[in-house]
Amino acid sequence: MSAAERILMYGVSAEQHTKIAKLYPLEKGYELSETDELRDLIAVPAKAIVINPNILSEDEKALIFDFYLQVHAPDNSLAMIFTEPINIPAALKHSDVYILDNII
């Protein structure tokens, strides 16, 4: 499966998984993958990462934000979707990463 088709989820509930599946249907070629490893959000290429921010420590949030701010290629290819409201660093808000929160 290519990164353009993979949706990686971290800490989502069964109800949230169902909602994500409606946004990214298998029939359109998307692969939904769940992980319980924070490092997968960095190591596994994906079209979108869906994160429950309530299970992340402040250090883990900073790690994710710093990685995508500094390393992500500016090709408008990644969406970061948070299941709950989260304080997003200003620099990341103005980057090429699409960020959505509190939508699932």
Image (cartoon, rainbow, N blue to C red):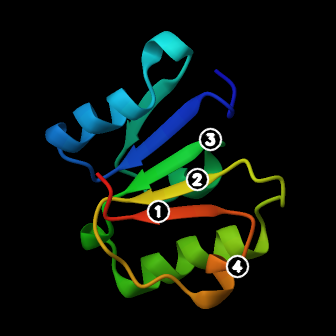
Say what amino acid the circle numbered 4 marks: His
Q: Tell me residue 40's x, y (percent).
A: 52, 50
- Residues tagged 1 and 2 counted as in contact (Cβ below 8 A): yes
User: Comparing marks 3 and 4, which lies closer to the viewer?
Assistant: 4
**Looking at the image, which residue is at 34% across and 80% down?**
57
**Looking at the image, which residue is at 31% across and 64% down?**
102
- Residues tagged 2 and 3 counted as in contact (Cβ below 8 A): yes
Q: Earlier in the sequence, mark 2 or mark 3?
A: 3
Q: Earlier in the sequence, mark 1 or mark 2?
A: 2
Residue identifier under label 4: 94
Q: Earlier in the sequence, mark 1 or mark 4?
A: 4
Residue identifier under label 1: 100
Residue identifier under label 3: 47
Near mark 4 (Cα within 10 A), the count class, few <14, some 14-19 or many ≥20, is few
Q: Nearer the viewer, residue 82 or 10?
A: 82
Q: Earlier in the sequence, mark 3 or mark 4?
A: 3
Say what amino acid the circle numbered 1 marks: Leu
Would residue 102 be found to the left or right of residue 73 on screen? left
Say what amino acid the circle numbered 2 marks: Ala
Residue identifier under label 2: 79
**Looking at the image, which residue is at 24% across and 32% down?**
18
Near mark 1 (Cα within 10 A), the count class, few <14, some 14-19 or many ≥20, is some
